[in-house]
Image (cartoon, rainbow, N blue to C red):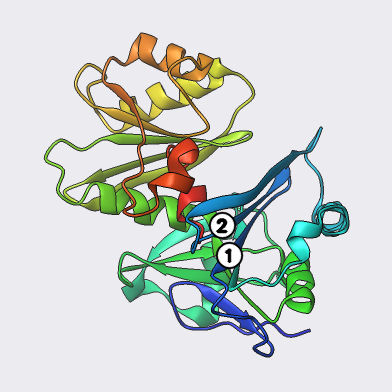
Amino acid sequence: MKLIQMETGQKTIQKINRIDLTSNIKLSIHISLNGLSFCIVDENKNEIVFLKEIVFPKKTTPKELLKHLKSSFKDNSELNDTFSSVKIIHYNNLSTVVPEVLFDKNNALSYLKFNSKILQNDYVANDSIFNNECINVYIPYVNINNFIFKKFDSFIYNHYSSIILEQIKLNEKNSTNPSLYLNIGLNHIDLTFFKENKLVFYNTFEYISKEDVIYYVLFAIDQLKLNPEETPIVISGKISKEDEYYKIIYKYIRNVSIFNSKIENKSKFYDDLKSDLILINSF
């Protein structure tokens, strides 16, 4: 089945239009080899009506991942409703950011071969970010997209790092003292640094323990020649001040804060998730 790629900041797959746009009930599905999460938002009622996360005991394969996804739709009737929009967020480390002036869509695969293990027949997608200044090139899970294509008439998909980069750039727009941003995921962290509203550093690292996390944070600080006594660090993800990851970071870096979403008119249903930078921007 052919996937249709639109030349926009996000990919839209569309077959026919049977989605009721007046319902304003939106579904977001986060896809990772380490787990799945589903979130349904009723924007008319201004609340989350369904939220579920599935964490796998060990990292799986794209083939097994599809089986888990199918089981989730079978076991959760809420996922089989009619939605005004469906969005898929792909999580993997098969991505890289390319300046728009250097991007050639006919050679998109070549941008990934230097930092990712890829195959010649891999399907390459891209997200336009920073008002089309840059292109985030990545490999989506095509078998997942095809399944969602069959199930829903249309959907949008992005790479998770596109959301991180866009939101941090927006957050740093008027900053005079740039911050280092740490996003904590299931088994990976993302470190991002902007200076004068320009992307200086972005990388993702797999971790097992809290010691791994602080190692990569201090490594990035050293490489960027930042001062851990002065440079603020902003943490996003599922984290609180009582969390062991927060405590070990605060032990080495004093200026630590937790990301706080400032999305207007959505504070009610985002209140408990306001530090989850990716989820709150997935609709």
Check disc 2 and give the amino acid type.
Val
Q: Amino acid at mark 1?
A: Lys
| Distance between the alpha carbons at the discs numbered 2 and 1 | 5 Å
Q: Residue furthest front?
A: 45
**Quadrant of residue 99 in the image?**
bottom left
The mark found on residue 41 in the picture is 2
Locate residue 191 relative to residue 180 in the image: left or right. right
Q: Which residue is mark 1?
A: 26
- Image quadrant where residue 27 sits: bottom right
Residue 137's spot in the image, x, y percent? Answer: 51, 65
Is the Cβ of the residue at disc 2 closer than 8 Å to that at disc 1? yes
Is 254 positioned to the left or the right of 18 in the image? left
> At x 23% / y 53%, what residue is drawn?
198
**Residue 112 visible in the displayed image:** yes
Between 145 and 17, the residue placed more toward the observer is 17
Picture layout, residue 223 above or below residue 118: above
Which residue is at the front of the view, 282 or 165?
282
